[in-house]
Amino acid sequence: MTRTFGEWLLERRREARLSQDELAARAGVSKSYISTLERNAPHPTTGAPPQPTTETVDSLAEALGVPIPVARDAAFGTGSAVLTSPEDLPEEVSGHIRRYILAWNAASPEQRPRIHQILETLLQHIEASVHLDLSQPAPMEAKDKEKDSKG
């Protein structure tokens, strides 16, 4: 079952430990609009679910400290959030990366090749399970290479 933007918003707001009032003030919207979004309350006349504007989604993302591409993906259901920097990673992913870094830093030089091998195996499994070719440059890498060739 697909979750609504409102469910996503409620979860992010609670993670940020913000009240509806606090989030509304930070994002420049009303508390009642936050409530409407979180409840996925239908429009009284049309019955349509709430559909925030891109500007509103961006303001909410900034107020919550969530990467804008991730918030837009949650709001508009594109499934195409393109992450362009490590700061864009969802918290659950960046937490795993932090753990990898801690493991790498704690490992002896003799243990590091094994850690690298485990990560490579994991990436191969990801590629195979979702039919990706991670040997191609990611959008961020492509942009970096383009800048390097120009500059």
Image (cartoon, rainbow, N blue to C red):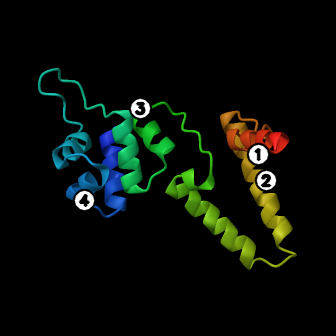
User: How far apart are the alpha carbons under marks 4 and 1?
Assistant: 43 Å
User: How far apart are the alpha carbons under marks 3 and 4?
Assistant: 24 Å
The answer to the question of whether label 2 and label 1 lie on touching residues, with beta carbons closer than 8 A, is yes
Mark 4: which secondary structure? helix
Q: Which residue is mark 1?
A: 124
Q: Which residue is mark 3?
A: 76
User: How far apart are the alpha carbons under marks 3 and 1?
Assistant: 30 Å
Left or right, 75 with respect to 125, comes to left
Neighbour class for label 4 at 10 Å: few (<14), some, many (≥20)? some
In this rendering, does residue 1 appear at all? no
Q: Position of residue 118 (x, y in %)?
A: 77, 59
- Name which residue type carries label 4: Glu
When the figure is inspected, residue 118 is found, relative to residue 72, above or below; the finding is below
Q: Position of residue 1 (x, y in %)?
A: 38, 35
User: Which numbered marker is on residue 22?
Assistant: 4
- Name which residue type carries label 2: Glu
Q: Which residue is mark 2?
A: 120
User: How far apart are the alpha carbons under marks 4 and 2?
Assistant: 43 Å
Q: For residue 108, what is the image quadrant?
A: bottom right
Residue, x 60% and y 61% (percent of image)? Answer: 96
In this view, the residue farthest toward the front is 151
Mark 4 or 1 closer to N-term? 4
In this rendering, does residue 36 appear at all? yes
- Name which residue type carries label 3: Phe
Residue, x 70% and y 72% (percent of image)? Answer: 103
Mark 3 or 4 closer to N-term? 4
User: How far apart are the alpha carbons under marks 2 and 1?
Assistant: 6 Å
Mark 4 or 2 closer to N-term? 4
In this view, the residue farthest toward the left is 44
Mark 2: which secondary structure? helix
Give the mark toward the camera: 4 or 2: 4
